[in-house]
Amino acid sequence: MNFSSKLLEDAVNEFSKLPGVGQKTALRLVLHLLNKEQEEVNQFGNTFIKLKQQIKHCSTCHNISDYSICEICTSHKRDKETICVVEDTRDVMAIENTGQYFGVYHVLGGLISPMDGVGPSDLFIDGLVARMTAGGIKEVILALSPNMEGDTTLFYLYKRLKEFNVPVTTIARGIAFGGELEYADEITLGRSIITRVPYETAMMK
């Protein structure tokens, strides 16, 4: 792509680094911003600078939050005896959108993937074990994407949590293998939460 300006080219290159954004889309976005008032462009940029500088991760569940402990963990309306383990914040949002889950969460920050050099120590698994050790948990729901990395992580977590004698369940496989949890429609995901099954039962299927 030929550019009439190095500044324009640099801006397009930055936008095209975003997932799913090619150079043509990036160019369209940059030209759109160029047509905006200076104040609007400043606000756009400052929003992301502020996000990066001020965003926090909940010290309890590791979800992205404006506060040191997120609103889900501090809510008196949530069932603190049920923990839903997910890969990242996108999965928390997907499950919350179903309106079918009322417990709390634990965000792992990824999935075990030896091919990518991601092991158990790279995830927030020790924090989950610490929450279990503290007591008061009556169920752990493993809500991970049904793919190779998700299944590897499920198996590892099940072995780590087995000693606590707390029911460990997994979401029903209404989601096709190889799919991503965040892309499941709300009805399918909601039903998968409601019809969750013991992990041992799921392993035998």
Image: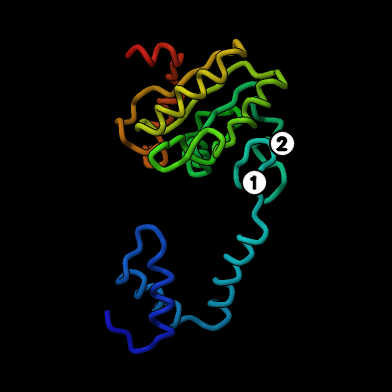
Left or right: 22 in relation to 106? left
Q: Which residue is mark 2?
A: 74
Question: Which of the 4 quarters of the picture holds residue 173?
Answer: top left
Observer-side mark, 2 or 1, equals: 1
Badge 1: how crowded within 10 Å, few (<14), some, or many (20+)? some
Q: Callout 1: helix, strand or loop? A: strand
Query: Counting residues from the N terminus, which is met first, the one under dot 2 or under dot 1?
Result: 1
Viewer-side residue, 86 vs 161:
161
The residue that appears at 64% across and 37% down in the rendered structure is 72
Q: Position of residue 80 (x, y in %)?
A: 66, 25
Badge 2: how crowded within 10 Å, few (<14), some, or many (20+)? few
Viewer-side residue, 160 vs 190:
160
Hey, what amino acid is under mark 2?
Thr
The quarter of the picture where the N terminus appears is: bottom left
Hey, what amino acid is under mark 1?
His
The residue that appears at 38% across and 88% down in the rendered structure is 5
Q: Which residue is mark 1?
A: 57
Give the colour scheme of this rendering: rainbow
- Which residue is outermost to the left? 1
Left or right: 4 in relation to 97? left
Q: Give the vertical position of 119 relative to 165 (above or below).
A: below
The quarter of the picture where the C terminus appears is: top left
Q: Callout 2: helix, strand or loop? A: helix
Question: Is any part of residue 97 visible from this angle?
Answer: no
Question: Which of the 4 quarters of the picture holds residue 70?
Answer: top right
Q: Position of residue 164 (x, y in %)?
A: 62, 14
Q: Position of residue 200 (x, y in %)?
A: 43, 12
Left or right: 59 in relation to 174? right
- Which residue is outermost to the bottom? 4
